């Protein structure tokens, strides 16, 4: 499912997960993110900004990273994450 477009930006808020479920990145609507790796909750936390379908991340230690949404898939520094579908 592709993100929705609000103005010039893709709506990225929600949970993004690798195919094996090992990495779970929650992009919060307030521009913060919380990434879990395996059993390690909040392995990385920080903020993100969205320009079009491009994301810029700055974690709380100052480390920077980028990501891009293409065809509803988040490509983030070598990772491929899919938007988690909510159960109905």
Image: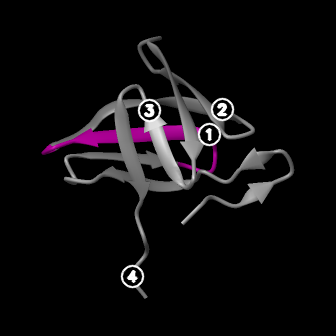
Seen in the image, is 6 located left or right of residue 30?
Answer: right
Q: Is disc 4 placed on a helix, strand or loop?
A: loop
x and y, in percent, of residue 6 in the image: 80, 55
- Residue hosting label 4: 87
Gap in Å between the C-alphas at discs 1 and 2? Answer: 6 Å
- Residue hosting label 1: 31
x and y, in percent, of residue 52 in the image: 75, 39
Compared to 48, does 62 lie above or below?
A: above
Find residue 4 and name its label. Answer: none
Which residues fall within the magenta stretch?
A: 28-39
Q: Marks 4 and 3: CB-CB under 8 Å?
A: no
Camera-near label (3 vs 2) is: 3
x and y, in percent, of residue 37 in the image: 21, 39
Seen in the image, is 88 located left or right of residue 58?
Answer: left
Q: Earlier in the sequence, mark 1 or mark 2?
A: 1
Compared to 39, does 15 lie above or below?
A: below
Find residue 76 and name its label. Answer: 3
């Amino acid at each position: 499912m592709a993100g929705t477009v609000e103005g010039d930006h893709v709506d990225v808020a929600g949970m993004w997960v690798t195919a094996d479920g090992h990495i779970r990145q929650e992009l919060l609507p307030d521009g913060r993110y919380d990434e879990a790796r395996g059993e390690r909750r909040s392995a990385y936390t920080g903020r993100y900004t969205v320009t079009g379908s491009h994301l810029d991340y700055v974690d709380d230690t100052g480390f920077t990273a980028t990501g891009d949404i293409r065809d509803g898939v988040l490509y983030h520094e070598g990772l491929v994450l899919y938007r988690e579908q909510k159960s109905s």
